[in-house]
Amino acid sequence: QVQLQQWGTGLLKPSETLSLTCAVYSGSFSGHYWSWIRQSPETGLEWIGDINDSGDTNYNPSLKSRVTISVDTSKNQFSLRLTSATAADTALYYCARGFPMVPIDWGQGLPVTVSS
Amino acid sequence: EVVMTQSPFSLPVTLGQPASMSCNSSQSLIHSDGNTYLNWFQQRPGQSPRRLIHRVSHRDSGVPDRFSGSGSDTDFTLKISRVEAGDVAVYYCMQNTYWPTFGGGTKVEIK
């Protein structure tokens, strides 16, 4: 069973950059797609994007201009950067393992708040 | 963007009785490869979502056969044949025929 551990910026101000990292334990890193999803009471579940171990990415078109997902295969980690944050980016952020554009095994989630 | 609409919002059910919930998409989910990429997720209180069903009707490993999915094109259904206490959760549909979008969820609770 894969284990996913997330960390990163929990509180940031508007216009700052959100940065999160997810480390993968107890499972193969290659051969999977690694996703970011967020959840808020206002907007529900929203898929942000994913990446594989070769660095191939898929992004939500509505966020694509602000999102970068990267991978570090030497550490079995992948990361999310979301620029120009606003209050609308306040959410619980999940990392997950799965297939292209379908997250299957989700991490525990990390709350992120954007507030001045 | 494909909009996923779920109903009802809340579904009170008696233990041991069946439950059924709907998911409709704003456009056909039939992919050019012939598959329909419609998934169902379960999110228990305080937990992360867990996928139950993929490609409309295929149960994921470890999912009880009390859960079944059906439907086609734009109309889909998740059924629980006999609700147990552990089924209390919010159930989400998600399509990935196009870039992924989720429904708003159906909350199953015990009467």
Image (spheres, coloured by chain):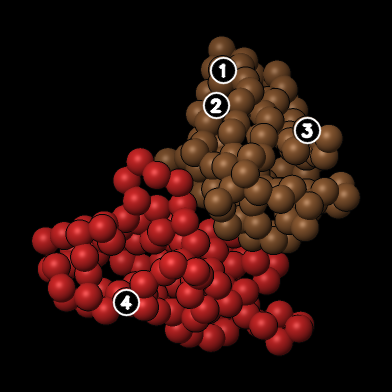
Looking at the image, residue B95 lies above or below residue A114: below
Residue that badge 3 annotates: A75
- Image coords of residue B32 (percent x, y): 76, 82
Secondary structure of residue under mark 4: loop
Secondary structure of residue under mark 2: strand
Task: Using the image as rendered, state which of residue A54 and residue B98 is in the foreground.
Answer: A54
Residue that badge 2 annotates: A112
Residue that badge 1 annotates: A11
Q: Chain of mark 4?
A: B
Q: Is residue B51 visible?
A: yes
Q: Is residue A82 visible?
A: no
What residue is drawn where x is 48% and y is 85%? B71
Q: Chain of mark 3?
A: A
What residue is drawn where x is 49% and y is 69%? B61
* Three-letter amino acid code of the residue under disc 3: Lys
Label 2 with label 1: CB-CB less than 8 Å: yes
Label 2 with label 3: CB-CB less than 8 Å: no
* Three-letter amino acid code of the residue under disc 4: Arg
Label 3 with label 1: CB-CB less than 8 Å: no
Label 3 with label 4: CB-CB less than 8 Å: no
Looking at the image, residue B77 lies above or below residue A23: below
- Cα–Cα gap, marks 2 and 1: 6 Å
* Three-letter amino acid code of the residue under disc 1: Leu
Q: Which mark is residue B66?
A: 4
User: Quarter-wise, where is residue B78 in the image?
Assistant: bottom left
For discs 3 and 4, the disc positioned in front in the rendered view: 3
Chain B colour as displayed: red
- Cα–Cα gap, marks 1 and 4: 42 Å
